[in-house]
Amino acid sequence: MKKITYVEINKQHFVQFPEERISGLILPSTDFTSASVGEVAPGIAQASHSHKRPQNGDEIIFVYQGYFEFVTENGTQKFNADRIGPVFIQVPAGVQGSIKNIGNRPVRFFSVFSPPFKMGEINYW
């Protein structure tokens, strides 16, 4: 019988990812996907980066709190998840991007990778 996995997201379990300038938690993965939760502190810009994804996989980012800019090589877009609600962002493999917190509360997000995230796939700019 297949089992359902539950993880309580407790900020006390977050770890720092200094090279990316965020804190977060990597969640259990499956054969097909992996996920994480993250936070960008007020006044901080996540390190600009891209993912060298297997099979040209995508990263889906679901930002559910905060006022932020999503910065890419093609420009910048402002969002206020506190005012308009959650923001869905789909980032294809190899596309550079970052979250810049321009508010006074943490920017909180949930990311899903398909195929699963592998250590070493991030390229920082």
Image (cartoon, rainbow, N blue to C red):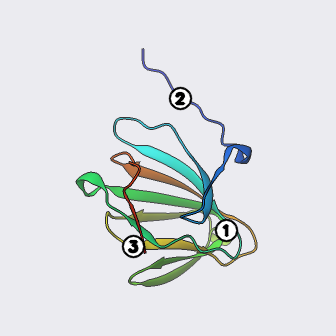
Front residue of 86/98: it is 98
Q: Residue at x 66, y 37 (%)?
A: 8
Q: Residue at x 69, y 76 (%)?
A: 43
Q: Label 1, label 3: how many angstroms apart (C-alpha)? A: 21 Å
Residue 57, position as x, y percentages in the image? 30, 55
Q: Which numbered disc flags the more N-terminal residue, 1 or 3?
A: 1
Residue 5 numbered tag: 2
- Which quadrant, please, contains the C terminus? bottom left
- Which quadrant, please, contains the N terminus? top left
In the image, residue 93 above or below residue 43 = above
Q: Label 3, label 2: how many angstroms apart (C-alpha)? A: 32 Å
The amino acid sitting under disc 1 is: Gly
Q: Which numbered disc flags the more N-terminal residue, 3 or 2?
A: 2
Question: In this figure, which residue is indicated by the disc labeled 3?
Answer: 96
Q: Is residue 89 visible?
A: yes
Q: Which numbered disc flags the more N-terminal residue, 1 or 2?
A: 2
- Circle 1 SS class: loop
